[in-house]
Amino acid sequence: MKTWDLVDGVVELPDGRRVRGTGLRRARRGPNVPTPEFGVYLLGRDPRINAWQYAWVRWRDFQRPASPHDALAVLRDAHERAATERVEISCAGGTGRTGAALAVLALLSGVEPDEAVAWVREHYRSRAVETRGQKRWIEQVATSLAC
């Protein structure tokens, strides 16, 4: 199995799982970049990818997911899969929605709720999680995980 070693956007979560965050507009594909085994696509419409398994989360740009419950279920699945598979998380640009999803994965990996956004900004992109609504959604997820 090819790993995510030396691939742009790969983040190692505190529990050792590795996930690639990227934007579909700039995702590099080629012989030296392994394809994901599972992708999570955070977009307004289904990307219809045929090359690997994926889950689509309806999530418009600069918004929160259309179904927060479904989004969390998909991200839980992605987190589990990342233990043994190459998992990619992506929106169009790779910053806001992808950053919010990676912050949730960080929570699932043990990052404290009040540190999740800072953690993803330090380890992925400094501008990750672009809106107050995205930050509030992460806080709501943290609260639901604590119950």
Image (cartoon, grey):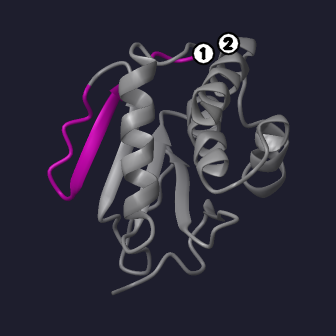
- Which residue is at the far bottom? 1
Circles 1 and 2, Cβ within 8 Å, touching? The answer is: yes
By secondary structure, the bulk of the magenta-drawn segment is best described as loop
The residue drawn where x is 44% and y is 42% is: 75
Residue bounds of the magenta highlight = 46-61
The kind of residue on which mark 1 rests is: Phe
In this orientation, which residue lies closer to the viewer: 134 or 104? 104
Horizontal arrangement in the rendering, residue 133 relative to residue 45 (left or right): right
* Distance between mark 1 and mark 2 Cα atoms: 8 Å
In this orientation, which residue lies closer to the viewer: 95 or 85? 85
Helix, strand or loop under label 1: loop
In magenta stretch: residue 144: no
Asked whether residue 24 is in view, the answer is: no
Q: Measuring from the top left, give residue 121's x and y in whole percent.
A: 80, 45
Horizontal arrangement in the rendering, residue 8 relative to residue 117 (left or right): left
Asked whether residue 50 is in view, the answer is: yes
Q: Which residue is mark 2?
A: 133
Q: Quadrant of residue 2?
A: bottom left
Query: Which tag, 1 or 2, sits closer to the chain's start?
Result: 1
Viewer-nearest of discs 1 and 2: 2
Q: Which residue is mark 1?
A: 62
The kind of residue on which mark 2 rests is: Gly
Horizontal arrangement in the rendering, residue 1 relative to residue 132 (left or right): left
Q: Measuring from the top left, give residue 119's x and y in whole percent.
A: 80, 49
Q: Measuring from the top left, give residue 58's x and y in whole percent.
A: 35, 21
- Estimate how packed mark 1 is, as few (under 14), some (14 to 19) or many (20 or more) residues with alpha carbons within 10 Å: some
Q: Is residue 45 above or below residue 89?
A: above
